[in-house]
Image (cartoon, rainbow, N blue to C red):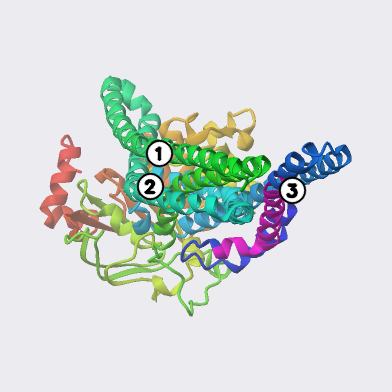
């Protein structure tokens, strides 16, 4: 096993660490070249024994039995027994080699595919659904694994069996072997037309499988919402519609491929009848012996088995071809956000106690459509200052903050941190500077401690507790019997929405970020807890530059600057008092949220 999954597998990972252009069998088979040779070699010996045995059986009949020569019979029987034992040994070696080879390639391929996906920016991830990426990483790679294992076991056997059986049949009788010349092209044409007809359906099948997986994932992850709105029937109908579509495509494939084996068997059966008839005629006229006819039938049976195997191989390879195409669709996606060739030399330890200056210079951003999500935005924020961003849904608030840590890249304009273009920082350094709490509250299965240490694995317990206290999460965490070692279920299902938000905020504060971004990350908090959180951030992280995205005007009142967004544009930028005096949109937001006071 170590030959496949040990040093050579690690070597492939190292040599291909930055080379994920596409998948080719040659690249992935190279580290396992020993077993690429050993498996077929063992299969060749096994097949050779199969080819020789019918001829030995023919000699036993024509010589041993005909002449009542028992020593000769025992001698050939012993040879046949030895060949069968040898065949079993070779079959075991081939089986093990093919299995380990397939597993090794699948392990490397799955690992590299997963690593490549993790290099994607948000822009590339937007092009795939999570279900599609899961299917490509697991199902399609498993299909490749099956094809590789099958190739060693079957594909290497077929040529040896065909060539050996045909040669031996020709040696027995050249005229009768001409039957093969008629059978081979007939079966070849049948397989060609079947393959050509089924290939498009395999591609459609994969697409429908992605759709079905996506519906299932969405339904199960949102099961509480489904139950709350009594939409079980609707979701069931949606699932059934996709499931029926998948079944319909699969049924078409089955209908087409189901005729392949019967047709081939029919051709073979008629050919066998012809061989028996013609062989009987030639035995009567003395041109062939009974043993030769039996041997000839055995060879034709082996050739027929080879044709059946080829039919199965074609079906598997057709599926694999579609799977490889889908895998390469992922590998061929180039990450649009990469590290610069000559990055700015930045040492976080020397700067972690100070905030960072941020400036946007005529920044525009689009998700790929003609309309910009952010349009010509310019502002500057000094180190340690607080920026608030407010606006309606879809106004571009989240798009603005996602540009700072380069989760997306600006389409036009320049974003600078401390006067340096964000594109000149290493991504690792840039994301040490920026601690962002996204809208979606994501916790991972493990413990509270393991979740908090995502930004810094070496963070001390003191730092974790400090972050929890600032995020107003310490009180409920300390009540846990295991404290920081308390378990977190998948997706944080064992915490309330407000608790999850506070834990994600605490996680972003670990590692001394110089910029903290809260993207509507206190929406699940009550006003009192929200106020405590803002106060703690302003007092405990006084030197840190802070950006708050919120729907609540009261949460942004004390910010040094507030950007009012509408349709991707900054309607106005200023302090709370300044905007109340001159920005009608801001006034509408404030008064609509607090009609009882003058704000």
Magenta stretch, main secondary structure class: helix
Which label's residue is closer to the chain start, 1 or 2? 2
- Of circles 1 and 3, the one toward us is 1
Residue 282 x, y percent position in the rendering: 57, 44
Q: Is residue 543 above or below residue 480?
A: below
Q: Quadrant of residue 555?
A: top left
Q: Residue at x 20, y 52 (%)?
A: 395
Residue 141 x, y percent position in the rendering: 51, 49
Along the line of sight, the residue nearer the viewer: 482 or 70 = 70
Mark-to-mark CA distance, 1 and 2: 8 Å
| Residue on which disc 1 sits | 263
Q: Is residue 48 magenta?
A: yes
Residue 352 x, y percent position in the rendering: 53, 64
Q: Residue at x 59, y 52 (%)?
A: 173
The answer to whether residue 560 of the structure is visible from this angle is no
Q: Is residue 15 magenta?
A: no
CB contact under 8 Å: marks 1 and 2: yes
| Residue on which disc 3 sits | 90
Q: Is residue 291 left or right of residue 219?
A: right
| Residue on which disc 2 sits | 190
The kind of secondary structure element at disc 3 is helix
Q: Quadrant of residue 11?
A: bottom right
Query: Which region of the structure is painted magenta?
Result: 26-53
């Amino acid at each position: 096993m170590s030959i496949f999954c040990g040093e050579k597998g690690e070597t492939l990972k190292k040599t291909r660490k930055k080379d994920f252009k596409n998948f080719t069998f040659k690249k992935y088979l190279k580290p396992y070249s020993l077993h690429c040779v050993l498996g077929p070699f063992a299969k060749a010996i096994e097949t050779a024994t199969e080819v020789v045995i019918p001829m030995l059986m023919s000699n036993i009949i024509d010589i041993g039995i005909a002449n009542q020569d028992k020593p000769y019979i025992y001698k050939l029987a012993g040879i046949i027994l030895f060949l069968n034992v040898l065949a079993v040994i070779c079959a075991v070696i081939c089986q093990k080699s093919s299995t380990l080879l397939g597993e090794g390639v699948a392990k490397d391929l799955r690992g590299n595919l997963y690593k490549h996906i993790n290099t994607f920016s948000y822009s590339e991830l937007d092009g795939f659904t999570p279900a599609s990426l899961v299917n490509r990483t697991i199902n399609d790679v498993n299909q490749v694994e099956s094809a590789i294992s099958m190739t060693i076991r079957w594909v290497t056997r077929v040529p040896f069996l065909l060539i050996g059986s045909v040669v031996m049949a020709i040696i027995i009788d050249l005229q009768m072997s001409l039957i093969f010349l008629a059978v081979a092209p007939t079966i070849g044409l049948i397989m060609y037309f079947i393959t050509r007809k089924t290939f498009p359906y395999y591609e459609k099948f994969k697409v429908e499988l992605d759709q079905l997986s996506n519906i299932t994932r969405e339904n199960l992850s949102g099961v509480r919402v489904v139950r709350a709105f009594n939409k079980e029937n609707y979701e069931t109908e949606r699932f059934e519609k996709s499931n029926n579509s998948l079944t319909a495509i699969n049924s078409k494939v089955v209908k087409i491929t189901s005729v392949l084996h019967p047709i081939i068997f029919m051709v073979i059966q008629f050919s066998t009848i012809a061989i028996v008839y013609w062989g009987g005629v030639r035995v009567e006229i003395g041109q062939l012996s009974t043993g030769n006819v039996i041997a000839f039938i055995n060879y034709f049976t082996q050739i027929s088995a080879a044709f059946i195997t080829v039919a199965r191989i074609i079906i598997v390879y057709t599926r694999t071809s579609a799977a490889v195409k889908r895998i390469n669709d992922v590998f061929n996606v180039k990450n649009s956000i990469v590290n610069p060739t000559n990055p700015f030399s930045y040492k976080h330890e020397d700067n972690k106690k100070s905030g960072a200056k941020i400036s946007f210079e005529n920044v525009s951003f689009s998700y790929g459509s003609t309309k910009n999500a952010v349009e010509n935005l310019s502002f500057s924020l000094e180190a340690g200052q607080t920026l608030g961003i407010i606006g309606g849904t879809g106004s571009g608030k989240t798009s603005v903050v996602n540009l700072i840590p380069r989760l997306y890249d600006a389409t036009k304009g320049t974003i600078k941190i401390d006067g340096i273009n964000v594109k000149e920082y290493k991504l690792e350094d840039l994301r040490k500077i920026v601690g962002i709490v996204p809208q979606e509250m994501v916790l991972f299965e493990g413990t509270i401690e393991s979740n908090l240490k995502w930004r810094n694995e070496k963070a001390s317990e003191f730092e974790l507790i400090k972050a929890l206290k600032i995020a107003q999460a310490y009180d409920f965490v300390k009540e846990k019997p295991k404290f920081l070692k308390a378990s977190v279920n998948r997706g944080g299902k064992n915490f309330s929405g407000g608790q999850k938000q506070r834990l994600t905020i605490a996680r972003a504060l670990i590692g001394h970020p110089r910029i903290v971004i809260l993207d509507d990350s206190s929406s699940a908090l009550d006003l009192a807890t929200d106020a405590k959180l803002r106060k703690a951030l302003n007092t405990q992280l006084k030197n840190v530059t802070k950006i708050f995205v919120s729907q609540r005007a009261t949460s942004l009142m004390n910010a040094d600057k507030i950007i009012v967004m509408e349709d991707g544009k900054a309607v106005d930028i200023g302090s709370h008092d300044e905007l109340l005096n001159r920005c009608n949109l801001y006034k509408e937001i404030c008064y609509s949220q607090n009609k009882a006071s003058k704000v």
